């Protein structure tokens, strides 16, 4: 029984020590969501004006690759690799927002359960003020974790649509410029491919 009591005390100590990292993680998560929301609004306004920064960057890289390529034989392989790497960058841009969607509720739940143990211990000792403080921490952490997750989920829905649209336009622009290069035509003028940047 003493061994079991020692193990329980050890686990209680670990959970108590984890409260600070969990709360700190939730604070950092909240700040990150606010920063991401700001960049999301900026991108939203840019796209309303027909400007897609990833697509414009890809068009520049593609034009440079086509201009510097010397062998027409391997040109399609070079362009395909550029397209795949650009699409991979687009997909990786969603990783952080997906991380927040998953981690927010987990941190919120941990931030709830850890103070609940302290609260129950305080209740057994009759320390009502300490119990009330622990309950406030417990409910606050779960609300913050869920709020971060919900906001991140809503932003990810729109962001994924943007990424899919950009990837579709990248493929179209790649095929168009590659065919013009293979046929010996000049690269597209900016105004001719304006629809690919919208």
Image (spheres, rainbow, N blue to C red):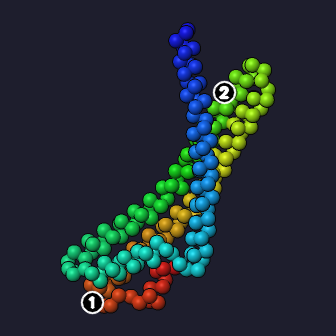
Residue 174 figure quarter: bottom left
Q: Is residue 120 left or right of residue 64?
A: right
Badge 2 is on which residue?
117
Q: Is residue 133 left or right of residue 112?
A: right
Residue 54: image location, x then y, percent: 46, 72
What residue lies at 60% left-to-right and 44% top-to-bottom?
A: 24
Residue 15: image location, x then y, percent: 58, 29
Mark 1 or 2, nearer chain start: 2
Q: Quadrant of the N terminus?
A: top right
Q: For numbered disc 1, what is the local secondary structure?
A: loop
Up-down relation of residue 87 to residue 115 (above or below): below
What residue lies at 73% left-to-right and 24% top-to-bottom?
A: 122
Camera-side residue: 63 or 7?
A: 7
Residue 32: image location, x then y, percent: 58, 55
Up-down relation of residue 151 to residue 108 (above or below): below
Numbered badge on residue 184: 1
Camera-side residue: 136 or 99?
A: 136
Residue 67 figure quarter: bottom left
What residue lies at 44% left-to-right and 59% top-to-bottom?
A: 92
Numbered badge on residue 108: none
Mark 2 neighbour density, 10 Å: few (under 14) some (14–19) many (20 or more): some
Up-down relation of residue 79 to residue 4 (above or below): below
Contact (Cβ within 8 Å) of mark 1 with mark 2 = no
Up-down relation of residue 45 to residue 7 (above or below): below
Residue 108: image location, x then y, percent: 63, 41
């Amino acid at each position: 029984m003493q061994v079991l009591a020692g193990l329980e005390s050890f686990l209680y100590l670990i959970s108590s020590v984890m409260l600070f990292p969990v709360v700190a993680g939730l604070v950092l998560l909240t700040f990150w969501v606010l920063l991401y929301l700001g960049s999301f609004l900026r991108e939203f306004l840019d796209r309303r004006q027909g400007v897609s920064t990833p697509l414009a960057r890809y068009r520049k890289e593609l034009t440079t690759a086509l201009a510097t390529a010397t062998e027409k034989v391997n040109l399609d392989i070079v362009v395909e690799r550029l397209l795949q790497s650009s699409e991979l960058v687009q997909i990786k841009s969603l990783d952080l927002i997906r991380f927040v969607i998953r981690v927010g509720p987990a941190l919120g739940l941990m931030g709830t359960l850890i103070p609940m143990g302290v609260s129950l211990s305080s209740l057994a000792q009759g320390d009502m003020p300490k119990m009330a403080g622990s309950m406030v921490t417990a409910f606050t952490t779960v609300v913050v974790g869920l709020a971060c997750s919900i906001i991140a989920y809503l932003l990810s829905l729109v962001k994924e649509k943007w990424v899919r649209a950009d990837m579709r336009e990248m493929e179209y622009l790649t095929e168009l410029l590659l065919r013009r290069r293979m046929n010996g035509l000049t690269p597209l003028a900016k105004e001719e491919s304006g629809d690919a940047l919208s």
